[in-house]
């Protein structure tokens, strides 16, 4: 099934491209707020959505917001594709390299994003959304704790990220709007192979990244196992799984996002994020 946040309300998106409002069909049993519904009643959401047979309502995709608008925890992975590690001159890691994106960076799939400086980069990523609490979960059971998959952009201010003497990954990747997510939350059963999805990123129509999630060094199940071994994961938490090669700072010469650019991020079976960049705001 495919879910979305339509103007602040949880909907199921059906095959003809229309939306069924789940709070309405459940007569208020399911919260209209997507975040609350995922955090408190995800199993019931699936039951109600599966039984909903009424005609859907047409909608404009531009009205979609992040399907998980206020996650409590947002984990992200560095160097989780060998080709991305190699383009940065790094060996493939033996353990997941994890940092946090602060939840206030999350924005919608078609939101405008204000640049923080002149060295802002792109990173298309598959994002796993937790649906059931997970603590010390084995990889073999990990997918049972995943509500679905969506797309994320790990937009990165490379100046802040690599500031000396100690890198600041979390701060450099958490400016407002630096975590577009969406446009849909797709349950794992919808994919022919949930571990092998094509992903692509383009800037102003020019492809800059292409890859497949089968090349993740630590795939989704392994990430759930490794993260939950340390931190209890809760419904609505997000895991940005890492990006393939093709980031701007690795190009010769380096290339970064500029005001007026359109950043598109696509994953097979999920959809496309489309975010326009605007100039930095003047300092106060």
Image (cartoon, helix red, strand yellow):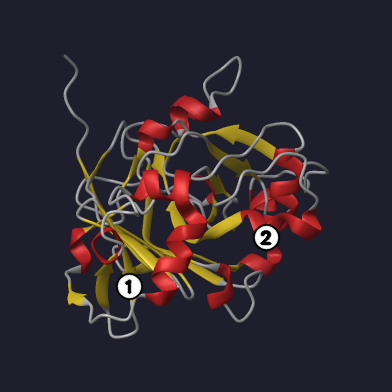
Residue occupying the point 42% across, 43% down: 155
Query: Where residue 50 appears, x then y in whole percent?
Result: 44, 74
Task: Decide if residue 217 is in sight here.
Answer: no
| Rendered image: mark on residue 143 | 2
Q: Nearer the viewer, residue 162 or 142?
A: 142
Q: In this view, does 95 lie above or below 266?
A: above
The residue that label 1 is drawn on is 13
Helix or strand or loop: what does disc 1 sit on? strand
Relative height, residue 233 to residue 47 (above, below): above
Which numbered disc, 1 or 2, marks the residue that appears first in the sequence?
1
- Up/down of 127 relative to 56, above or below: above
Rendering quarter of residue 18: bottom left
- Residue 81, compared with residue 90, is above or below; it is below
Residue under the image location 63 percent in, 42 percent down: 78
- Residue 280: image quadrant is top left
Residue 195 placement, left or right of 229:
left
Residue 11 visible (yes or no): yes
The one of 266 and 65 positioned closer to us in this rendering: 65
Expressed as whole percent of the image width and height from the top left, the position of residue 221 reads 72, 56
Tag 2 secondary structure: helix
What whole-number distance in Å separates the C-alpha atoms at marks 1 and 2? 22 Å
Count of numbered badges drawn on the protein? 2
Write down the quadrant of residue 121 in the picture: top left
Q: Quadrant of the N terminus?
A: bottom left
Give the camera-side residue of 272 and 45: 45
Q: Position of residue 227 (x, y in %)?
A: 70, 39
């Amino acid at each position: 099934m495919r879910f979305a946040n339509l103007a602040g309300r949880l909907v199921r998106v059906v095959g003809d491209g229309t939306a069924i409002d789940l709070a309405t069909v459940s007569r208020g049993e399911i919260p209209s707020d997507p975040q609350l519904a995922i955090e408190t009643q995800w199993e019931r959401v699936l039951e109600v959505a599966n039984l909903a047979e009424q005609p859907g309502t047409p909608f404009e995709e531009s009205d979609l917001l992040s399907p998980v608008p206020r996650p409590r925890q947002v984990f992200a992975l560095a160097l989780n594709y060998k080709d991305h590690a190699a383009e940065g001159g790094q060996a493939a890691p033996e353990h997941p390299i994890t940092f946090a994106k602060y939840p206030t960076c999350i924005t919608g799939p078609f939101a405008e994003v204000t640049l923080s400086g002149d060295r802002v980069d792109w990173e298309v990523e598959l994002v796993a959304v937790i649906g059931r609490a997970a603590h010390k979960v084995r990889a073999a059971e990990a997918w049972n704790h995943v509500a679905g998959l969506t797309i994320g952009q790990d937009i990165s201010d490379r100046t802040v990220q690599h500031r000396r003497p100690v890198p600041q990954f979390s701060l450099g990747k958490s400016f407002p709007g630096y975590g577009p997510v969406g446009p849909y939350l797709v349950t794992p059963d919808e994919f022919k192979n949930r571990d092998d999805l094509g992903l692509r990123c383009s800037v102003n129509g020019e492809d800059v990244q292409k890859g497949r999630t089968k090349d993740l060094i630590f795939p989704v199940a392994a990430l759930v196992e490794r993260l939950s071994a340390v931190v209890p994961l809760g419904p609505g938490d997000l895991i940005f799984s890492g990006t393939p090669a093709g980031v701007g700072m690795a190009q010769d010469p380096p290339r970064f996002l500029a005001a007026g650019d359109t950043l598109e991020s696509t994953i097979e079976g999920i959809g496309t994020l489309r975010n326009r960049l605007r100039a930095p705001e003047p300092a106060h």
